[in-house]
């Protein structure tokens, strides 16, 4: 478990910027002092609440808003900690424990009669006995700080990979490319990007955002990967993972996958391109976020869409939704996964730009826009200019793969 068996005491511990942090320690272990690493509205001290239910409700409200919460609780026993890891999981947020394990002599001097000596000794030994099991209790990280380390250590917050609120754009969000290299070059040119051989220069200040599914079905998946990887490396573009990208990553990582829906051709192209390029692709795909929160939280990029309660979350549930959309687990008469229309129920404030489900034209539903216009199926490749909220499409040069059924109509912006 990370941090639990520290050989050298760190100067700084790293915590996820979005987490439920449980500060565990017996009275006198310095929990309140340690809480000063956090803002007052982030800290929830069990002693300040009338009962457990009031404390839980206050923390839950904070997690629901996608904000970090620090809970000060004795919680020396696993049973007392269990509700906190469960609450974090319920909100698709990581639970992290920080154990403050002060020397017994210091505790006895500080306790000042609030606990009997026997009770103090019992609690300290319970804490130490169970510290090694925190991972199994559902805490993704646990830091075990001892003695003088408690007062000395600093705290650094590490933003989640999906959190790029610091980037304000303007952006050009691009739907499923699926190996359509010529159309991608056409679209980037129409958007004002200057393509000169391998190099791509965006219009002043703009950044492209690829919504995933770069490969399969179209004629040049390797070429699309090369172009997008270069753009991401130079800072001209960002990219999120699509379900096809995930499957390609699994194949390149040596996992058994069914090479369907054009993956067989992509893998043959990559075979041709050689092992060094395959390794670059694998590393690139591995580093992609499952979705992105952009522009101070006002814009979400997610391949399959994302409901508001999963924005900015790093959980498996958030990842799965962003990659595959809202699947029911059933298959239709063509053997394709049945997807719910998540956008119809979306009531969040940020604009969600996504792809994944091809339509004949961009589909605006409330504050969501689906930019997958089925280029590889002979449709078009579409971009959204943000914050302008204008779409731009270039037609496919050919039908590269037969659509399983005619593309349903899109929907104009209200
Ligand atoms: Mn797709």
Image: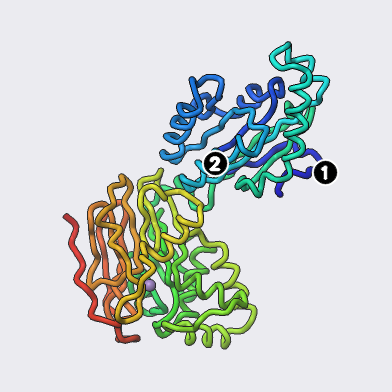
Q: Could you tell me how far apart the alpha carbons at marks 1 and 2 are, in whole angstroms?
A: 25 Å
Identify which residue is drawn at 52% across, 86% down. Answer: 269
Identify which residue is drawn at 48% across, 32% down. Answer: 56
Q: Residues within 10 Å of mark 1 (few under 14, many from 20)?
A: few
Query: Quick one: SS at disc 2?
Result: strand
The image shows residue 292 at horizontal and vertical percentages of 44, 54
Q: Is residue 339 visible?
A: yes
| Direction from residue 339 to residue 18 in the image, left or right | right
Vertical placement of residue 228 versus 122, above or below: below
Vertical placement of residue 396 versus 47, above or below: below
In the image, which disc is placed on residue 7? 1
Report ligand 1 position as a quadrant. bottom left
| Direction from residue 75 to residue 402 in the image, left or right | left
160, 274: nearer the viewer: 160
Vertical placement of residue 8 versus 227, above or below: above
CB under 8 Å between discs 1 and 2? no
Identify which residue is drawn at 34% across, 86% down. Answer: 401
In the image, which disc is placed on residue 19? 2
The image shows residue 336 at horizontal and vertical percentages of 35, 77
46, 167: nearer the viewer: 46
223, 216: nearer the viewer: 216
């Amino acid at each position: 478990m990370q941090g639990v068996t520290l050989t050298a005491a760190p100067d700084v511990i790293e915590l996820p910027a979005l987490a439920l942090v449980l500060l565990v320690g017996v009275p006198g272990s310095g929990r309140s002092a340690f809480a000063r690493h956090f803002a007052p509205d982030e800290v929830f001290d069990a002693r300040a609440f009338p009962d457990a239910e009031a404390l839980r409700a206050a923390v839950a409200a904070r997690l629901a808003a996608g904000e970090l919460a620090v809970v000060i609780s004795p919680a020396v026993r696993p049973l007392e900690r269990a509700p906190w890891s469960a609450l974090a999981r319920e909100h698709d947020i990581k639970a992290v424990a920080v154990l403050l394990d002060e020397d017994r002599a210091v505790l006895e001097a500080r306790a000042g009669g609030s606990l009997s000596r026997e009770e103090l000794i019992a609690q300290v030994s319970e804490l130490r006995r169970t510290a090694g099991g925190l991972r199994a209790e559902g805490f993704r990280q646990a830091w075990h700080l001892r003695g003088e380390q408690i007062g000395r250590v600093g705290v650094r917050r590490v933003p989640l990979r999906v959190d790029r609120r610091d980037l304000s754009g303007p952006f050009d969000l691009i739907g499923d490319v699926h190996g359509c290299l010529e159309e991608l070059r056409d679209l980037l040119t129409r958007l004002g990007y200057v393509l000169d051989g391998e190099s791509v220069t965006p219009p002043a200040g703009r950044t492209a955002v690829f919504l995933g599914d770069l490969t399969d079905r179209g004629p040049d998946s390797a070429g699309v990967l090369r172009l997008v990887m270069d753009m991401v490396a130079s800072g001209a573009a960002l990219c999120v993972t699509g379900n096809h990208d995930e499957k390609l990553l699994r194949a390149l990582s040596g996992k058994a996958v069914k090479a369907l829906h054009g993956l067989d051709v992509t893998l043959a192209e990559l075979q041709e391109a050689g092992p060094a390029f395959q390794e670059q692709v694998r590393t690139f795909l591995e580093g992609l976020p499952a979705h992105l929160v952009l522009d101070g939280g006002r814009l979400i990029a997610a391949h399959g869409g994302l409901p508001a309660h999963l924005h900015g979350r790093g959980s498996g549930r958030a990842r799965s939704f962003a990659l595959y959309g809202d699947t029911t687990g059933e298959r239709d008469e063509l053997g394709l996964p049945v997807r719910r229309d998540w956008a119809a129920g979306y009531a969040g404030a940020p604009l969600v730009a996504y792809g994944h489900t091809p339509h004949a034209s961009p589909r605006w539903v409330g504050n969501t826009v689906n930019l997958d216009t089925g280029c590889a199926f002979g449709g078009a490749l579409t971009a959204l200019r943000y914050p302008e909220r204008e779409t731009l499409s270039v037609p496919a040069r050919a039908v590269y793969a037969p659509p399983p059924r005619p593309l349903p109509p899109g929907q104009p912006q209200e």
